[in-house]
Image (spheres, grey):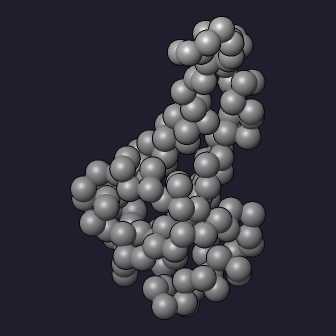
Amino acid sequence: MSKAWVLVANHTHARLFEAEKRAGTLNEIETLVYPEGRMKGQELLSDAPGRTFDSRGEGRHAMEGTNVRKRGAKRFAKDIAHTLEKGRQQGRFDRLYIVADPSMAGNLRLSMSSPCLASIAGEARKNLTKSDTEEIRAQLPMWL
């Protein structure tokens, strides 16, 4: 019997479900959390941004730092991709369905291995991390 995994994710939270048959129930098997993703960018930095002079004139302003939240979301996507790859290598699923907000879906695709990408059988770009299993299942009728 083929098994499918369903990943529901956003930039701070990921839920992994297993479905053993078509139209079957989803069983949550793992939850991943990235709490720093909810923090403000300044809270993630240990220091305030530096100050610089304008290129023209005498004004000073705060320097814009790199987007710490985006880097954190990419790191979280890599953690999720590692979990998926481990499951694929162990033969725990042969089809993968991804339901993720658009930015996380893009980060995931960039972080996943080629064999794991090849196992994707369907994708929806929605944030359903706070939804119950019935709501999530309702988004997948044509796939599962």
Q: Using the image as rendered, state which of residue 5 and residue 126 is in the foreground.
A: 126
Q: Is residue 130 left or right of residue 45?
A: right
Q: Is residue 86 left or right of residue 99?
A: left
Q: Is residue 135 above or below residue 61?
A: below
Residue 82 seen in this snapshot: yes
Specify the quadrant that holds the N terminus: bottom left
Q: Could you tell me which residue is drawn at 54 percent across and 27 percent down?
A: 66
Q: Using the image as rendered, state which of residue 28 and residue 67 is in the foreground.
A: 67
Where residue 77 appears, x then y in whole percent? Answer: 49, 46
Q: Using the image as rendered, state which of residue 111 and residue 132 is in the foreground.
A: 111
Q: Could you tell me which residue is drawn at 48 percent across and 59 percent down?
A: 105
Q: Could you tell me which residue is drawn at 44 percent across and 42 percent down?
A: 78
**Numbered disc total:** 0
Where residue 94 appears, x then y in whole percent? Answer: 34, 70
Q: Is residue 61 above or below residue 69?
A: above
Extreme residue toward the left, this view: 114
Extreme residue toward the front, this view: 57
Where residue 35 appears, x then y in whole percent? Answer: 70, 38
Q: Could you tell me which residue is drawn at 73 percent across and 40 percent down?
A: 38
Residue 22 seen in this snapshot: no
Tell me where residue 24 sits by quadrant: bottom right
Q: Is residue 96 left or right of residue 13?
A: left
